[in-house]
Image (cartoon, helix red, strand yellow):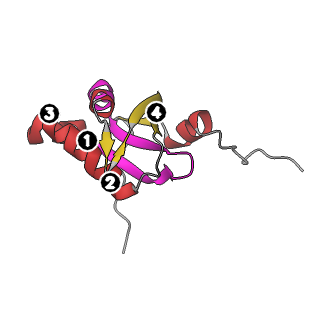
Amino acid sequence: MSRPETLPSSLRKKKRYIAFEILSEEDIDFGDLINALWSSILDLFGEVNTGEIDFWLVKDAWRKKTKRGLIKCSHRHVSEVRLAMALINRIGESEVSIRSLGVSGTMKSAKKKYFGEKDLSNFEN
């Protein structure tokens, strides 16, 4: 059985990764964070426009200790996602403020730039 062909990069949807940080006194549960982000985006833009935004919270990039994470979205709707993030003032029972750290085209470069992760691919002994 052969593998399906992947789309060439020119036909794939363009995406951006928004690095963010949550400022709060208490720890933030990932599930509560997802609910708050989805609620904010749906309330602000409705179901139809939310589909065009192509919003997704990247679970593997969530750092509970530093309260930092990545959101993937369409390259055309970065400002809308940042607006929805800025309007969130409560996650679960905690009062919060969400700060956008920056935007990147790849997850790897976003982690490197905004989370301080090192790339060991060119590490020499």
Determine the CA span between mark 4 and mark 1.
15 Å
Q: Where is residue 25 in the image (x, y as percent from the top left)?
A: 48, 43
Q: Which residue lies furthest to the right in this view?
A: 125
Q: Does the magenta stretch include residue 49?
A: no
Determine the CA span between mark 3 and mark 4.
24 Å
- Category of crowding for the residue at label 2, using alpha-carbon neighbours closer than 10 angstroms: few (below 14), some (14–19), many (at least 20): some
Q: Position of residue 121 (x, y in %)?
A: 72, 48
Determine the CA span between mark 2 and mark 3.
20 Å
Q: Name the residue under label 2.
A: 32
72 or 83: nearer the eye?
83
Which quadrant, please, contains the N terminus? bottom left
Are discs 2 and 1 less than 8 Å apart at CB? no
Left-right relation of 42 to 82: left
Q: Mark 4 points at which residue?
A: 105
Residues in magenta, as a range: 55-82
- Category of crowding for the residue at label 4, using alpha-carbon neighbours closer than 10 angstroms: few (below 14), some (14–19), many (at least 20): some
N-terminal-most mark, 1 or 3: 3
Q: Mark 1 points at which residue?
A: 54
